Image: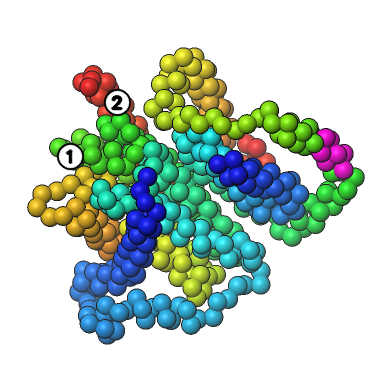
Amino acid sequence: MRPLSLQLVSVVTVLVGVLTLAAGLIWLERRLLAFWQERLGPNRVGPAGLLQPVADAIKLLAKEDWVPPFADRPVFVIAPAIVFVTVLMSFAVVPITPGIGVVDLDVGLLFFLAMTGLGAYSAVLAGWASGSKYALLGGLRAAAQLLSYEVFMGLSLMGVVVMAGSFNLRDIVDAQRDLWFIVPQFAGFVVFMVAGLAETHRLPFDMPEAEAELVAGFHAEYSGMKFGMFFVGEYAGIILISSLITVLFLGGWHGPWLPGWLWFFLKTMLFICFFILLRASLARPRNDQLMAYGWKVMLPVALLNLMVTAAVVLAVGD
Amino acid sequence: MNVMFYVAAVVAVACTVRVVTHVNGVHALLYFVVSLFAVATIFYLIGAPFVAALELIVYAGAIMVLFIFVVMLLNRGPQSVAQERSWLNPRAWVGPTALSLVLAVEVGILLFAGDLELETQTRVAPKEVGITLLGPYLLAVEIASMLLLAGLVGAYHLGREGGREGGREGAHREPGAGR
């Protein structure tokens, strides 16, 4: 057990780091999308438009925070907070370097899966509480999509758990000192990345908020900072999935020459940019295509990966 | 440690009471979720972190979402609240409450007699749970999985659209078929 002061410093570092990065992503995503679409993107506020998130935040805070009269008020208010809280809670178990990290939990990976599962409530409840048909349809889609992809998100990680022999994320990083798990667990890596994309309902898997069909889906009735919570929660979710890919498949802080936290940051940023590139380049599938893809392709791949991994580990022995 | 246990236990009991007494379906289910959180906390406190995590993943994260999904699909609206309210008249709940109070008094007496000290501080790591499940309890696990498989096959059968000849597009079903 570390002293309380050090613990607090860790908590504040992770919290401030995540929130700053999440705000920065608003700028990064818009600039990168603009770059790939051959336009400029936001470049007016501050140097190279860097202060754009500040301007966005001021705009959101100054907007009327309206609760529709037909909404279920308590649930409507609490729903945006859920996604934010669960994502931030998950960061508690992410080890950034041997020294930085909030808790060292024996069941760290399960804790992450539990928090992801609870995050599903946010979209589902928001859709239900809004009391409008588009939001309800978005909520229904969210429930189906998040529940389905949660199943093999968990299964895809079990290969890593079998190889590391632990649910503890620090042990998992340490087990990758010689060989990153992306090499022996490539199938697990792909499945986890797709499932992570679906769990954060990012494009191309943003069926719950598909604006062409559902206005804005589950958050159609939200305005002001409540909408901002969904927005920032989504970005924090991208950071979470990217940092977990780093921890689980890319050896976390391990890497030559550079200090550990910088390696962690670089690997995480690589995946964040990759997710933004996916948004820029892929079209949205239909809802039934998404479900069929999940259950008929991803689930068998994840199960097969787990079986083969377990068999190999059992045969090689240690 | 004991204080934390009792706080979590009180939260669990209070939430469960609200599950029964709340007139709005979704709100009642949300209380149920909080009650599951409290139970998970208790599991963690008495040294079973693995069970605590599974409680959150399986019950709070998956099964309750399905419950809420179904309630959303039904989307009963305000008239169901009025209906619930009429069902919760005193005649319905006085009897069970009196009986529960008797049990509560008994539990209170047992607790204050000091027979039940909560000091089981042996942490059960995930690995031990796995070894126990696939070791001495292998038969029970296999029987449970057979039961689940039967449930899965049954659900698949019930969910088939329009029997043998109806494919995905065969949507001309009788109203109420397949319930």
Q: Which residue is mark 2?
A: A310
Image side of residue A88 versus residue A157, left or right:
right
Q: Amino acid at mark 2?
A: Ala
Q: Nearer the viewer, residue B138 or A90?
A: A90
Q: Position of residue B52 (x, y in %)?
A: 50, 38
Of residues A149 and B117, the one nearer the viewer is: B117
Q: Amino acid at mark 1?
A: Arg
| Viewer-proximal residue among A318 and A304 | A318
Residue at left offset 47%, top offset 39%: B53
Q: CA distance from mark 2 to mark 1?
A: 20 Å
Return the residue at label 1. A177
In the orientation shown, which residue stands out farthest toward the left?
A: A257
Q: Earlier in the sequence, mark 2 or mark 1?
A: 1
**Region in magenta:** B94-103
Q: Chain of mark 2?
A: A
Magenta stretch, main secondary structure, is helix
Residue at image point 46% right, 21% down: B133
- Residue found at the very far right of the displayed protein: B91
